[in-house]
Amino acid sequence: CMLLPGTHSKWAQIENGKIVRYATYLTGELFAVLSKHSILGRLMPAEGEGKKESDAVAFKLGLTTARSSGPGDFTHQIFGTRTLGLTGRVPPSGLADYLSGLLIGHELVSGMAGAGDLASVPLVMIGAPALCRRYADALGHLGHTAVATLDNTAPAGLWNLARAAQLIKESP
């Protein structure tokens, strides 16, 4: 199973050299929209204001909330970000991390359910190192690990596709 976290995370399950399942999640873009253009973002400090490092406790709370969700809980839990901020249970500086944990948690719960038994199916992550570390932390909190993490392979892949399609002329 290959996990490519990002704005539009991708999960690809490969068997015998063929993709047998492919799922895409809007995790990163949904985070951006909710934190910048919704009522949730109004409680969060603006980028660069008062936040020096991530809030691991808030992130794990989001993951735990996602893992324990039931049918139809997703949008209710998203709105819970506001409630946690208004009641002071999560400080404003931790709300983005809580929301991130909640969204990544829901993606991982769904992706892992679709992948089957991850104890017998190796999980490989491919993407930006910082984002892969965040996903690795989330996987660890949920009791799973990736067997390997590869740096973003998209630029090299696109270059190879362009060369194969003869869109690029290589100098001798």
Image (tube, helix red, strand yellow):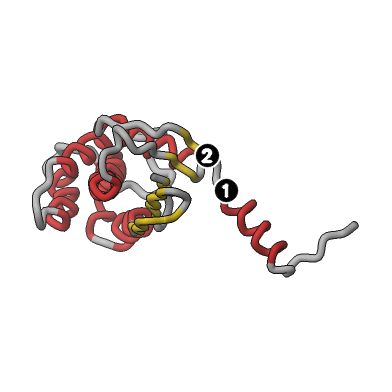
Split into 4 quadrants, where in the image is the C terminus?
bottom right
Position in image of residue 24 (x %, y %): 36, 59
Front residue of 148/13: it is 13
Asked whether residue 95 is in view, the answer is: no
The residue lying toward the viewer, choosing from 120 and 86, is 120
The residue located at (14%, 49%) in the rendering is 80
Q: Where is residue 56 in the image (x, y as percent from the top left)?
A: 30, 31
What is the number of the mark on residue 153? Answer: 1
| Quarter that holds the N terminus | top left
**What SS does tag 2 mark?**
strand
Q: Nearer the viewer, residue 71 or 76?
A: 71
Quadrant of residue 50 in the image? top left
**Residue drawn where x is 42% and y is 56% of the image:** 19
Viewer-closest of 72 and 157: 157
Residue positioned 28% across, 54% down in the render: 41
SS at badge 1: loop
Kindly identify the amino acid type of the residue bearing the numbered disc 1.
Thr
Task: Give coordinates of residue 61: x percent, y percent.
Answer: 20, 36
Between the residue at mark 1 and the residue at mark 2, the CA separation in whole angstroms equals: 7 Å
| 109 left or right, relative to 21 | left
Residue matched to label 2: 150
The local crowd at label 2, few if under 14, some if 14 to 19, many if 20 or more residues have their Cα within 10 Å, is few
Position of 64 with respect to 7 (left or right) is left
- Asked if marks 1 and 2 touch (Cβ < 8 Å), the reply is yes
